[in-house]
Structures are given as C-alpha cells and as structure tokens.
Amino acid sequence: MLAFTTEELYGYRIYGGSTMRQAYTPKMLSCIEISRQLYRDISERYPDLEAAAASRAFSVNRCVYFQLPRERKEERLKVWDEMAKYRKTVISDPKARKRERLAALLSYAGPGAFHLLSGLYRRWQMRA
C-alpha cells in the first residue's frame, strides 16, 4: 500500500523475531548501550530531537527492564539507573507517547512500585 501526505510522520515496523519481542537473553542488554549511543548522537547532531531521543531511550530501557528476570538484580539496577536518566525529559515532553510519560512518572515511585503499577496498567489496558 502506498500513501502520500504533507504531514511529517514517523513510523516503524515491528518484527516478531526482533530482539525486543523475544524472551529475555543476555544479548538484550546490548540494546541499552545502543539506545545510549543513539541518544548521544541525536542530541549532538540534532538538538531539536533530543526529547524524542530521550523518549525512545526510555522506552527501550523500560522494555528490557520488564523482560529481565527478578534474580538478575545487578542488571536490573543498571537498566533502572539508565531509565532514570531520561524520565524527567520524557515527562516534560508533550510530544512523548502518553504511555511513556505515565511510565516515566510511575518510575519515581521506585522499582517495586513501578513494576506493580505498570503490571496493573497493562492488565487494565488489555481489558479496555
């Protein structure tokens, strides 16, 4: 299908076999470094896109965090700390996805509450 528009849009494809769609593997932690580097590169080269880059980096970290098994406490803490770097920017960005803004806000409650509240939100969203 082909469509034309004068609006500036962004889109991406979700592949079922992508790293982020699989069960946890240690390889997923590479996503954290990649998102960090993308954030740095975009912030330096395109400062007007810094908030969008922060939102994406937060999202990647959030996804990895939820896939990390609870017993991998050291990795979870590293991902949590990385996620915390972006949350203030995500909350204050009116163009960020509402889901990411809510997740960033919930993250201020701490890892335990964040995990619990996010789980409740996912269940509520499935019913809606």
Image: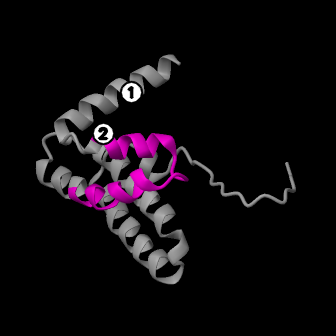
Left or right placement of residue 124 versus residue 11 in this view: left
Q: Kindly identify which residue carries mark 1.
A: 121
| Residue in the picture at 62% in, 54% down | 12
Q: Is residue 117 above or below residue 55?
A: above
Between 15 and 105, the one nearer to me in the picture: 105
Q: Amino acid at mark 1?
A: Tyr
Q: Position of residue 105 (x, y in %)?
A: 33, 43
Q: Position of residue 73 (x, y in %)?
A: 12, 48
Between 66 and 86, the one nearer to me in the picture: 86
Q: Position of residue 80 (x, y in %)?
A: 23, 52
Q: Kindly identify which residue carries mark 2.
A: 106
Between 45 and 28, the one nearer to me in the picture: 45
| Residue in the picture at 24% in, 45% down | 108
Picture colour scheme: one colour
Q: Quadrant of residue 44?
A: bottom left
Q: Which residues are magenta?
A: 81-106
Q: Main secondary structure of the magenta part?
A: helix
Q: Are marks 1 and 2 in contact (CB under 8 Å)?
A: yes
Label 1 neighbour load within 10 Å: few <14, some 14-19, many 20+: some
| Residue in the picture at 44% in, 72% down | 38
Q: Is residue 43 magenta?
A: no
Q: Amino acid at mark 2?
A: Leu
Q: Position of residue 70 (x, y in %)?
A: 17, 39
Closer to the observer: label 1 or label 2? 2
Helix, strand or loop at mark 2: helix
